Amino acid sequence: MSNSDETEGGAGFPALSLTGRVALITGAASGIGRASARLMAARGAAVVLSDRDDPGDTAAEIKATGGQALALALDVATDDGAAAMTRSALDQFGRLDILHANAGISGPLNPDLTTGAADFAEILRINLIGPWLAICAALPHLGAGASVICTASVAGIRAGAGGIPYSASKAGVISLVQTVASATAGRGLRINAVAPGLVETGMTAPLYTDARARGREDRIGQLNPLRRGGEAQEIAELVAFLASDAASYINGQVIAADGGLTASLPVAPRPAGGHPGA
């Protein structure tokens, strides 16, 4: 990479541009996936949106603003689904440069220690096997400079941020990123993970709805140093950065976007002027 203003940013931050690239985003009908697709399209990428729920509304919105988008309604956590979305991206746009493996579910809300094998397996299928299948389908078509971004979670880094099956699946995503980065050494492509903290999406909607109904919305995110929850757009900004040339030397990493939650210990706030504990 050059150290000139053209690649380091400067007016318009050209190093963040995705013009001429094709991005495939799973779980793109809502939440982080939708925000990621919209932002990458705004930065010049042609985007392929895939989801079990039809992402057509998002694709239509992108097209209405002059972007290129293709919507696919399919289950990406199957061999056939992963192959179909990759083939569709190539048929429509002729290449593939970026994969954002984002699709995921939180799983059933029953107590973790009573989660049966079938429910546990379904969470792993969508949250962990799904990204693996997407990567396997995309890899033959990703050349030097390509970027893969998986959506993990702070729940995969520390306990307490999600249910046991969900947390295990996201820890698996982190390991997947690290091991695939090692396995693809020398190919010139990059694979990283983003680990969101509490973000308002369709998955977390019940928590936000309940907090608002109780008049306790101001308590959301109070365990992190920023004292607030996140927004899907904030995670999309990190995803788009990792997809761009500005992140050309970042590989095999998991980057938390959590307001500082995983950087701190769960200790009681000290009074003003007090001293930190041991």
Image (cartoon, grey):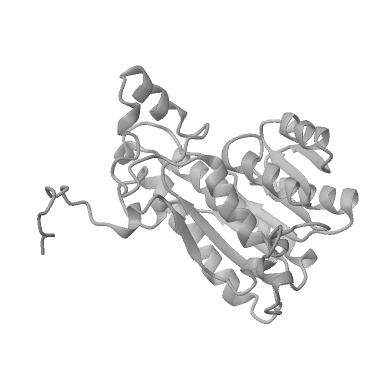
Residue at 34% x, 40% y: name it: 221
In the rendered view of the protein, which quadrant contains the C terminus?
Answer: bottom left
Q: Position of residue 257 (x, y in %)?
A: 46, 53
Residue 104 vs residue 96: left or right?
A: left
> Is 266 above or below relative to 138?
above
Residue projecting furthest to the top = 213
Q: Position of residue 168 (x, y in %)?
A: 41, 53
Query: To which quarter of the image does residue 61 belong?
Result: top right
Q: Position of residue 109 (x, y in %)?
A: 38, 31
Query: To which quarter of the image does residue 141 belong?
Result: bottom right
Total tally of numbered discs in the picture: 0
Q: Position of residue 207 (x, y in %)?
A: 39, 29
Query: Camera-side residue: 221 or 75?
Result: 221
In the rendered view of the protein, which quadrant contains the N terminus?
Answer: bottom right
Residue projecting furthest to the front = 11
Residue at 57% x, 71% y: name it: 250
Residue projecting furthest to the bottom = 186
Query: To which quarter of the image does residue 217 belong?
Result: top left
Residue at 84% x, 47% y: name it: 88
Q: Is residue 196 visible?
A: yes
> Is 42 above or below relative to 216?
below
Query: Camera-side residue: 46 or 84?
Result: 46
Residue at 73% x, 58% y: name it: 17
Q: Is residue 82 visible?
A: no
